[in-house]
Amino acid sequence: MAQPPPDSPPHSPPAPDAFAESFARADAREIRREILHQGYFAFEKADVEIARFGGGRDRFQREALRIGEVIILLPYDPVADRVLLVEQFRIAPWLSEDAHPWLWEPVAGRVDPGETPAQAALREAEEEAGLKLRPEDLDPLPPCYPSPGALIEHMHGFVARADLSGAGGTHGLPEEHENIRAFTLSFAEAMEAVDSGRMRTATGILLLLTLARRREALRALWR
């Protein structure tokens, strides 16, 4: 993978001592867990007992949707200063009665069994956007939990060097009911989409703001 320039933020998991003053897994206890539903995603329930800030213990029950390991990827052309996004129908805004359930997003998908996040990112880039990227084109972000109160989802983000001349079109796997439009925007247009609210997915906002922070360093590295 490309190495970040010396003056750029380090892209690595936090050091163990970053959690020195926090509770850890040993400060909680799982009493019971069960799968309530298994469909496209699994819906799980757990009874837990945890340590409380200020002392004492608390026992309660919570449910969460298991999505698993996922990747999000923002292809970036450092020469043309353009990004690639995708647009597709999403069930959550539809069920929320949103008037516009087709959303702009980065390339995204689940990590398949036996894959690394980087391998999944390369596969999804080709499936959703028709881009053939190399491992050395990926600049990774530290993994994160996008909605830890409700989703069992661990997200691996990447900004990727890409030649976006001629990129775009309709992609996706028909057997997965994917109908995905890939398109490119200038960096300025993409940031305007964030500011105006046209970009409404947190994953897209996250990667575009990350690119904004690292753009000059990545252009110096990749051009």
Image (tube, rainbow, N blue to C red):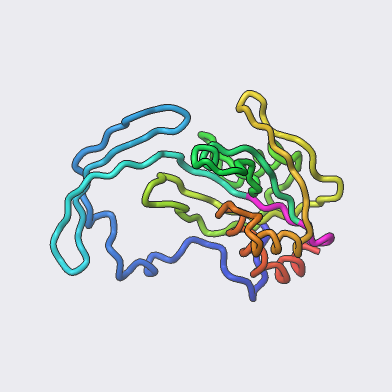
Q: Nearer the viewer, residue 207 or 14?
A: 207
Question: Which residue is painted at 30% across and 66% down in the image?
Answer: 22
Look at the magenta stretch and give its main secondary structure: strand
Q: State the image coordinates of residue 63 (x, y, percent, origin top left).
A: 31, 41
Is the N terminus in the top left, top right, bottom left or bottom right quadrant?
bottom right
Q: Nearer the viewer, residue 118 or 185?
A: 185
* Image side of residue 59 versus residue 215, left or right: left
Q: Residue lying at the far top in this picture: please name it.
A: 175
Is 163 within the magenta?
no
Q: Which residues are magenta?
A: 73-82
Question: Which residue is painted at 47% across and 53% down in the image?
Answer: 146
* Image side of residue 157 versus residue 182, left or right: left
Q: State the image coordinates of residue 87 (x, y, percent, origin top left).
A: 68, 43
Q: Residue lying at the far bottom in this picture: please name it.
A: 7
Q: State the image coordinates of residue 118 (x, y, percent, origin top left).
A: 60, 47
Is the C terminus in the top left, top right, bottom left or bottom right quadrant?
bottom right
Question: Which residue is painted at 57% across and 68% down in the image?
Answer: 10
Q: Is residue 195 above or below residue 171?
A: below
* Image side of residue 50 versus residue 181, left or right: left
Q: Nearer the viewer, residue 21 or 175?
A: 175
Q: State the image coordinates of residue 99 (x, y, percent, origin top left).
A: 60, 43
Is 80 within the magenta?
yes
Residue 213 occupies quadrant = bottom right
